[in-house]
Image: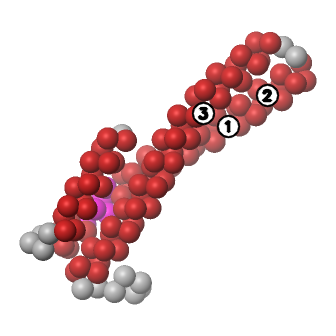
Amino acid sequence: MAKRIKRYIAYVDALLERDDIDVKKEMDRHLVQIGFFMHERLIHLIVLALFAVLTVITCIAFVVTANISLLILALAFMVLLVPYIKHYHLLENSVQYMYEQYDRMLEKSGEDVFVNR
């Protein structure tokens, strides 16, 4: 997914540099892609929150019971939590940047960015 996001952002940045594009058509396509990435972001937020809660619960259970297997489980959750945080960070920042790209498309089409439709 990270490659796809980076590739798509680079594609849209290249489109914004050109003057010979159908801005309205590209805006519609961009909104669809933003929707896909927002859905992905929501799923990863749910998974990230679940792993964070499980990590905290496992750490608390280890402190209460002093069972070494719970410590190993908590460490495993923490190891999995780091890549989820990194990936969610990429998704969040990328979607925010896509909003900025959309605003630039609006400006390019001659529309005011902050006018209610």
Taking the spot 83% from the left edge, 29% from the top edge, the residue there is 60
Using the image, determine if residue 72 lies above or below residue 103. above
Q: CA distance from mark 3 to mark 1?
A: 7 Å
**Between residues 32 and 75, which one lies in front from this camera angle?**
75
Q: Residue 44 appears at what percent x and percent y?
A: 51, 42
Mark 2, residue position: 59
Would you say residue 31 sits in the magenta stretch?
Answer: yes
Three-letter amino acid code at the position of disc 1: Ala
Quadrant holding the C terminus: bottom left
The way the protein has been coloured in the rendering is secondary structure
On residue 81, the disc is 3
Mark 1–mark 2 CB contact (< 8 Å): no
Query: What residue span does the magenta drawing correspond to?
Result: 28-33
Q: Residue 105 appears at what percent x and percent y?
A: 27, 73
Along the horizontal axis of the image, is 84 left or right of 103?
A: right
Three-letter amino acid code at the position of disc 3: Leu
Taking the spot 51% from the left edge, 48% from the top edge, the residue there is 89
